[in-house]
């Protein structure tokens, strides 16, 4: 659950969250919606041939942009949660260690679990190929499934320009880039947060300029697509993460609170995002929409916040990391089962029948699997690690006093 400060302090004229937060579910729910959008983006390709128009809707085809919403949300939320610890303060070793451990406990156990599942699946596919007589298939035979890729995933380096394609659990490239931004966050957040308005505008403009370079130069020139992953994904992540920090600074000032508290801003931001994606405008245009949507969700006091704070929406948000990390594995299992049942020799051009009904069933399957990994892997492992460190810390204190 994302928390929201109940009161604010001021450092050098910049209001900050206090250490007495109240809960806010709207941003948690946004994470869940973004995760579902990424799922539909990846699964739609399995059923696209069965749609009436025989083509993917442009809005769905742009679903990769919801990863950018994740990055901006991360910057916003971490500033909200850790602002009182790092902004205007010297970064101490204990504070830095606690911050990194909290982020490690949040992302790594499920990442390692899913990496293990992918490795086991690769071994199983090789054995299955021999049993069914569909030709020899060596495990770890491609760059995406190599031993080197296992090592880079273990050390969260898979998104740091070491590979030419997505490896193992493809979506985890973004977890890799976020981890390395986490390492920088405590040292940069004060500079960004306490900068003068002119410097904050310069930081925002520089971030957008770098994103423009990614969209128009690094990808297909002139295309304007932000779909960069293992090559320059770190730049994409860092720019948007620190735009999230700037967005939180604007939120903390309270300057736009009255206007953002109404539903119409939330609705307008949503429409802007949908139109940019549906009419295939340059991807950079979606960034202002995402920033506005986050600010509106944080400040909304009308229908939007009531909907986003319903139990199903909150639960979806709590499961969002599991949804994001598990869905391509579910897709791979479904493809493998279908190929075996239909007697195909390859799933390279696999298209499932059933159209939108099949897509709904696949999304439902992802939700079921993700609920299981959330309850059985993600939450217990995070709580265990936190409890383990707390016990070690308590033991150290007792030993020091004795």
Image (cartoon, helix red, strand yellow):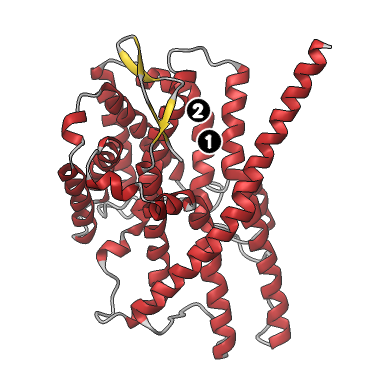
Residue lying at 39% horizontally and 42% vertically, measured from the top left: 25
Q: Position of residue 266 (x, y in %)?
A: 21, 45
Mark 1 to mark 2: distance in Å?
A: 7 Å
Q: Nearer the viewer, residue 394 or 82?
A: 394
Q: Position of residue 389 (x, y in %)?
A: 70, 31
Quadrant including the C terminus: top right
Left or right for 325, reference 42: right
Which residue is the site of mark 1?
Answer: 180
Which residue is the site of mark 2?
Answer: 184
Q: Position of residue 105 (x, y in %)?
A: 61, 39
> Which SS class for mark 1?
helix
Residue lying at 25% horizontally and 52% vertically, measured from the top left: 222
Q: Are marks 1 and 2 in contact (CB under 8 Å)?
A: yes
Q: Can you tell which quarter of the image residue 156 is in?
A: top right
**Quick check: 66 above or below 179?**
below
**Quick check: 54 above or below 139?**
below
């Amino acid at each position: 659950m994302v928390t929201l400060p109940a009161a604010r302090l001021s450092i050098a004229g910049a209001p900050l969250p206090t250490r007495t937060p109240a809960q806010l579910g709207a941003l948690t729910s946004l994470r869940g919606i973004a995760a579902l959008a990424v799922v539909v983006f990846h699964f739609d390709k399995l059923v696209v041939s069965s749609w009436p128009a025989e083509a993917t809707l442009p809005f769905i085809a742009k679903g990769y942009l919801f990863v950018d919403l994740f990055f901006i949300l991360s910057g916003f939320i971490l500033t909200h949660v850790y602002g009182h610890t790092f902004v205007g303060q010297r970064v101490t070793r204990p504070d830095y260690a606690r911050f990194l451990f909290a982020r490690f406990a949040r992302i790594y156990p499920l990442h390692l679990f899913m990496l293990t599942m992918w490795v086991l699946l690769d071994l199983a596919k090789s054995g299955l190929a021999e049993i069914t007589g569909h030709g020899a298939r060596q495990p770890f035979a491609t760059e995406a499934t190599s031993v080197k890729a296992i090592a880079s995933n273990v050390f969260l380096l898979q998104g740091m320009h070491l590979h030419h394609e997505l490896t193992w659990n493809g979506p985890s490239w973004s977890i890799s880039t976020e981890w390395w931004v986490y390492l920088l966050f405590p040292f940069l957040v004060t500079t960004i947060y306490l900068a003068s308005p002119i410097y904050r505008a310069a930081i925002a403009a520089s971030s957008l300029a770098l994103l423009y370079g990614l969209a128009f130069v690094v990808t297909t020139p002139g295309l304007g697509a932000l779909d960069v992953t293992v090559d320059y994904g770190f730049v994409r992540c860092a720019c948007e993460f620190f735009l999230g920090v700037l967005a939180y600074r604007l939120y903390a000032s309270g300057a736009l609170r009255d206007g953002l508290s109404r539903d119409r801003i939330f609705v307008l931001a949503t429409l802007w995002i949908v139109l940019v994606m549906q009419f295939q405008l340059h991807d950079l245009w979606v960034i202002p929409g995402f920033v506005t949507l986050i600010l509106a969700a944080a400040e909304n006091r009308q229908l939007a916040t009531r909907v986003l704070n319903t139990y199903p929406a909150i639960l979806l948000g709590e499961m969002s990391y599991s949804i994001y990390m598990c869905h391509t594995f579910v897709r791979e299992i479904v493809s493998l089962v279908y190929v075996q049942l239909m007697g195909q020799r390859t799933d390279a051009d696999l298209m499932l029948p059933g159209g939108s009904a099949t897509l709904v069933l696949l999304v439902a399957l992802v939700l079921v699997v993700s609920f299981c990994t959330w309850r059985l892997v993600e939450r217990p492992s995070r709580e265990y690690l936190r409890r383990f460190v707390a016990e070690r810390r308590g033991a150290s204190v007792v030993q020091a006093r004795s």
